[in-house]
Amino acid sequence: MSRFLVSKCICHSREFSEIKEYAKENNFSSVEELQAQDFCGCGCGLCIPYIDLMLETGETAFEPGAYYKKKSTKGMPSEDR
């Protein structure tokens, strides 16, 4: 496990916990809704996969590459992961 975690949108300097609360308050369930409000994910875009994962899981801090690792194991039998 990495000692560094991805936990914020760097371009907007917003922690995922803040983004999660904002999404909940506004009944947003997608990155596109957050982007339409210019709240996050509108700069470099590096946070977008993590915001997707946050909206899906409710977690607010991730190992680097967590989204891509999850995608690559999706559909694999659990014993192969």
Image: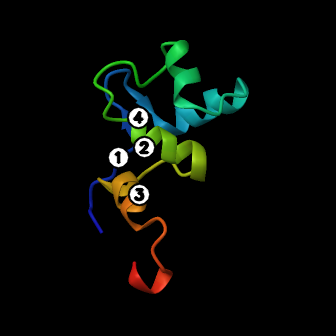
Q: Position of residue 67 (x, y in %)?
A: 39, 52
Q: Whole-Å distance between the Cαs marked 3 and 1?
A: 17 Å
Gap between marks 4 and 3 measured at Cα: 14 Å
Question: Which element type, helix, strand or loop, lies under badge 2?
Answer: helix
Mark 1 Cα shell of 10 Å, populated few (<14), some (14-19), many (≥20)? some
The mark nearer the N terminus, 4 or 3, is: 4
Q: Are marks 4 and 2 in contact (CB under 8 Å)?
A: yes
Decide which of tag 2 and tag 3 comes sooner along the chain. Answer: 2
Q: Quadrant of the N terminus?
A: bottom left
Residue indicated by mark 1: 6
Residue 71 image label: 3
Which three-letter amino acid code belongs to the residue tagged 3?
Lys
Disc 3 crowd rating (10 Å Cα; few below 14, some 14-19, many 20+) is few
Q: Mark 4 or mark 3: which is in front?
A: 3
Q: Which residue is mark 2?
A: 50
Amino acid type indicated by mark 1: Val
- Say which residue label 4 marks: 48
Between discs 1 and 4, the one toward the N terminus: 1
SS type, badge 1: loop
Residue under the point 27% across and 61% down: 3
Q: Is residue 44 toward the left or the right of residue 26 in the image?
A: left
Q: Amino acid at mark 4?
A: Ile
Task: Write down the quadrant of residue 36 in the picture.
Answer: top right
Which numbered mark, 3 or 1, is in the foreground of this view? Answer: 3
Residues at marks 1 and 2 touching, judged by CB atoms closer than 8 Å:
yes
